[in-house]
Image (cartoon, rainbow, N blue to C red):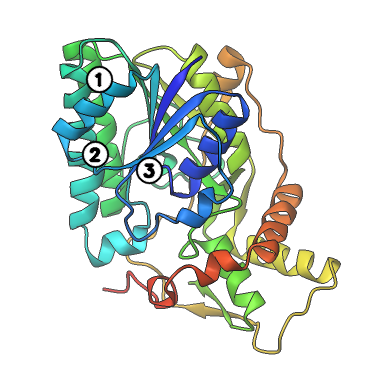
Amino acid sequence: MKRFIVTGGFGFIGSNLIRHLLNKNYKVLNIDNLSYSAQKYNLIGINSKNYKFKKIDINKKKEILKVLRNFKPNGIFNLAADTHVDRSIDNSYNFIKNNILGTYNLLEALRLFEKKIKLIHISTDEVYGDVPAPKRSYENSPYIPSSPYSASKASSDHLVLAYVRTFKMNALISNCSNNYGPRQFPEKLIPKMIYNILNNKPLPVYAKGKNSREWIYVDDHCDALIKLFFRGKVGEKYNIGSGFNCSNLFIIKKILKIFRKKNLKIGKKVKIYYVKDRPGHDFRYAINSEKIKKSLGWKCKTNIEKGLTKTIDWYINNRKFFSSISKKLFIKRLGTI
């Protein structure tokens, strides 16, 4: 039976990935430092004998090494990271500490471990920077990060590739587009809009809402990551995206349309309004994912209508998710300088 470590397993993508791995009857060890965005609610109902959790910061190299020797994993999915761009604008320290130094310490622990373990380092399409339409970023496109967040992820990617070349590390990198789905912390666009609609609050949109993102449903991302472990080539980079781009305004209007289609109440205060843009805000991200499609046979299965409907249904049926989080962590706008 395969054994996996998921770092950041109480986070959005990590918790969904853990459920996928357990559904395939793999053994999973969740390593998480339980930072502000780590929600124990995300793994509520998990009672499998194949699941274990250890509270560890990946910056604690000796503790990571001890876990590697005791658990003896076949693979590690590194999802331990600070990810919200606005927070990186307000205070970039945690992004440097967790995204760069955390990756370094994880790599060092793996280097010191006696056996080869396959590391899937999960990164972002934001490392490529602004991409004017109709262009898309490829795996060999230059890194042009614009925010402290994307710069920290770009740095961690370079570290991983350096360890592959210098120390023959058994690692590869995935660069994924914007994820959405159940269990996402409500500082991000889609869960924030759903929360505001459910609580009769206005819907703030940066600038005129024309910034374009490529959206992928989290289950499709998880499927791709598992394929990368089994068939991805060491030292390679793989873009993971749906190919579907749209504006932030389109997403918000689509969410409202689904609420109306379901005859769900929309309060009088639920109105779109425009706010000052984020400093250094990239206008468009878009990636080419043909490499993973052709080489691994992966494809995105969930269109935006289906994905948003499933996402809205989950938040409606799991309102305790919102109540389990301090409102101070996601109500106030960040990243205004």
Q: Residue 324 carries which label?
A: none
Q: Work out whether mark 3 precedes mark 2 in sequence or the reverse, and give the earlier one.
A: 3
Q: Can residue 194 be seen in this view?
A: yes
- The amino acid beneath tag 1 is Arg
Regarding mark 3 in the picture, which secondary structure is present there?
loop
Query: Mark 2: few, some, or many residues within 10 Å (few <14, many ≥20)?
Result: many
Decide if residue 337 is on the left or right side of residue 320: left
Q: Where does the image place residue 294, in percent across and percent down from the top left?
A: 60, 15
Marks 1 and 2 sit apart, C-alpha to C-alpha, by 15 Å
Residue depicted at x 72% and y 43%: 303
Q: Find disc 3 in the rendering and name its residue.
A: 8
Picture quadrant where residue 112 is located: top left
Q: Find disc 1 in the rendering and name its residue.
A: 69
Marks 3 and 2 sit apart, C-alpha to C-alpha, by 9 Å
Query: Mark 1: few, some, or many residues within 10 Å (few <14, many ≥20)?
Result: few
Q: Where does the image place residue 201, in percent across and percent down from the top left?
A: 59, 83
215 over 22 or under it: above or below: below
Q: Residue 58 carries which label?
A: 2
Picture quadrant where residue 312 is located: bottom right
